[in-house]
Image: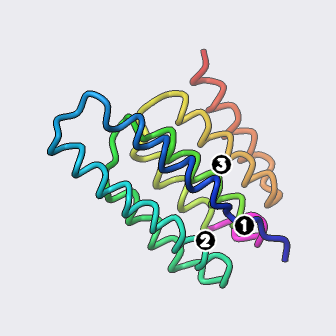
Amino acid sequence: MNRKKLHIPSLILFIFTILSVSIFGAPLGDIQTDVSKLQYAASQHEIIAILIEEGDWNQAVEEFYKILDLDLGLESEGSLVEEVWQITEQLLGAKQYDFSHQIIDSTLEICKLPDNRFTLLILKGKVFKEEGKLKAALDAFREAQALQE
């Protein structure tokens, strides 16, 4: 199986991006809460990577939902989408299409910013394309295009 591994630099970038966007302008109490959430998300990132490497797909998805439950806010939405992209790439490498769709769809439900929804729809189309569902892939790509109009 060809699996891509998450690298420490991507984890550091993930944490730094969320921290830098989330804490500026926030009250001190909110900053502490945000930092705790981000630390938790960082550990979840590593847990998910290990579970995917071990082939424990169900548990990896359950652990991902814990990141969504953190409600990191609009400021961190882009970083969340990057995380989804990385996880999906790993799942695609193992041909785990259903789990990829679960993660993408659950993130689409909470994402509000058009650019992030666009990215997730492109990713959704990519998953459909890889699994040979070309009509569904076209629909996802067209839905993404509609966001740009």
Label 2 SS: helix
Label 1 SS: loop
Earlier-in-chain disc, 2 versus 3: 2
Where are the magenta residues, as a range? Answer: 92-98
- The numbered dot on residue 5 is 1
Whether pointer 3 and pointer 1 mark residues with C-beta atoms closer than 8 Å, the reply is no
- The residue that label 2 is drawn on is 49
Residue drawn 78% across the image and 54% down it: 133
Residue drawn 84% across the image and 77% down it: 1
Residue drawn 42% across the image and 41% down it: 76
- The residue that label 3 is drawn on is 124
* Circle 3 residues within 10 Å: few <14, some 14–19, many ≥20: many
Give the side of residue 39 with respect to residue 116, left or right. Answer: left
Q: Hey, what amino acid is under mark 2?
A: Ala
Earlier-in-chain disc, 3 versus 1: 1
Magenta residue check for 95? yes
